[in-house]
Image (spheres, rainbow, N blue to C red):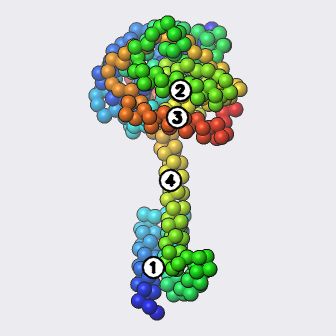
């Protein structure tokens, strides 16, 4: 194993454990954690078996395997960000509705008291 | 329509300077009203409370679309036949309400826009030249996109809606730049009729337009983009 492989393995394992800790504290929902758990797992597999990745990346025409690796990871992060934005938009709608309904109820309540 | 139940919807965000004046004018008309305080950070809520106004206090700022929609929801829940949006800053002349609701009473329109550009003789002091040009471009854009239906003042926030439109708006209403976007949505639907009536608008007595000058380019882009997306067939109204 090269030193790079060892560093990458350690980083992957540490981030995996960190994510698990957050999951255990339930500050992260299981549904939302899957994408984040997959990332260090993929890193770990690549660190232990780098051959398939370097073969595949040179077959695709990348100069170095790291370039290919970076590109894939940017793509994955982009996807996660995008889906996060979608869920923010959804939640904004829900919050708007919530604020409206609660405030209307409060108005009804205060009108009742006035009478 | 005999004796329709009429509600004035008055959205207010940081309007402490003008809200009392508007409130007194509205109270003098004997129409029902609801003020929507959109999470104001100034004294607006206090003033409303002290003057025993009928108001909904949104505990978090939703922006103009969310605030006005709250009014439409209130109108829907309380079985109003006509709901009229009136700005809290005194820009809209309440004496025009009768001409605004006339087409709805006669079943001629589902939404009536109070416009200061219909009657070309009545020169408006309301807006800057740049703003007028922007509104004209927007009007032409909507004209093209809706297949030849003209609204001269698509940004006017002085509008009256009948029961059918109230039901629609309480269900679905654009959060940002709601007037031009919702006007366009109604225009492209076969089931709604929009009419414009001439009104005179006052210079705003205080406060700022929700479309501020340095933001207006962005606003225009946003509106045009929203309309383009809608024209792609995003959740139609009909």
Which structural element holds mark 3? helix
Seen at 59% across and 84% down, the residue is A55
Q: Are marks 4 and 3 on the same chain?
A: no
Q: Tell me where residue A86 appears, x and y as whole percent.
A: 54, 52
Q: Is residue B235 left or right of residue B222?
A: right
Q: Tell me where residue A29 appears, x and y as whole percent.
A: 49, 63
Q: Which residue is mark 1?
A: A12
Q: Are marks 3 and 1 on the same chain?
A: no
- Which of the chains bears the disc numbered 4? A
Q: CA distance from mark 1 to mark 2?
A: 55 Å
> In this orientation, does residue A113 appear?
no
Seen at 45% across and 79% down, the residue is A12
Q: Which residue is mark 2?
A: B137
Q: Which residue is mark 4?
A: A85
Q: CA distance from mark 4 to mark 2?
A: 32 Å
Seen at 68% across and 27% down, the residue is B147
- Which of the chains bears the disc numbered 3? B
Q: Is residue B58 left or right of residue B235?
A: left
Q: Which residue is mark 3?
A: B223
Which structural element holds mark 2? helix
């Amino acid at each position: 194993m090269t030193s790079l492989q060892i560093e990458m393995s350690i980083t992957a394992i540490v981030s995996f454990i960190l994510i698990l800790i957050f999951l255990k504290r339930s500050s992260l929902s299981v549904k939302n954690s899957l994408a984040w758990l997959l990332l260090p797992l993929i890193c770990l597999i690549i660190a232990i078996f780098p051959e398939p990745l370097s073969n595949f990346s040179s077959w695709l025409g990348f100069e170095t395997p790291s370039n290919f690796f970076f590109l894939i990871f940017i793509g994955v992060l982009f996807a996660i960000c995008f889906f996060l934005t979608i869920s923010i938009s959804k939640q904004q709608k829900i919050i708007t509705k919530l604020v409206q309904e609660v405030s209307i109820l409060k108005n009804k309540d205060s009108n009742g008291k006035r009478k | 329509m005999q004796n329709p139940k009429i509600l004035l919807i008055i959205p207010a965000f940081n309007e402490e300077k003008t809200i009392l004046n508007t409130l007194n004018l509205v109270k003098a008309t004997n129409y029902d009203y609801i003020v929507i305080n959109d999470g104001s950070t100034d004294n607006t809520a206090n003033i409303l409370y002290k003057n025993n106004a009928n108001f909904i206090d949104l505990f978090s700022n939703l922006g103009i679309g969310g605030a006005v929609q709250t009014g439409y929801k209130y109108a829907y829940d309380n079985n109003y036949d006509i709901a009229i949006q009136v700005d809290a800053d005194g820009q809209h002349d309440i004496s025009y309400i009768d001409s605004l609701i006339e087409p709805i009473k006669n079943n001629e329109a589902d939404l009536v826009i109070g416009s200061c550009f219909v009657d070309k003789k009545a020169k408006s002091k309301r807006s800057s030249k740049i703003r007028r040009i922007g509104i004209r471009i927007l009007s032409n854009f909507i004209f093209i996109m809706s297949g030849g239906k003209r609204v001269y003042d698509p940004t006017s926030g002085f509008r009256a809606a009948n029961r059918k439109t109230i039901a629609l708006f309480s269900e679905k209403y654009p959060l940002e730049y709601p007037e031009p976007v919702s006007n366009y949505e109604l225009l492209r639907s076969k089931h709604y009729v929009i009419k414009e009536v001439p009104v005179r608008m006052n210079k705003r007595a205080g406060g700022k337009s929700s479309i501020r000058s340095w933001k207006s380019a962005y606003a225009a882009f946003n509106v045009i983009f929203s309309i383009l997306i809608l024209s792609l067939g995003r959740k139609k109204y009909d």
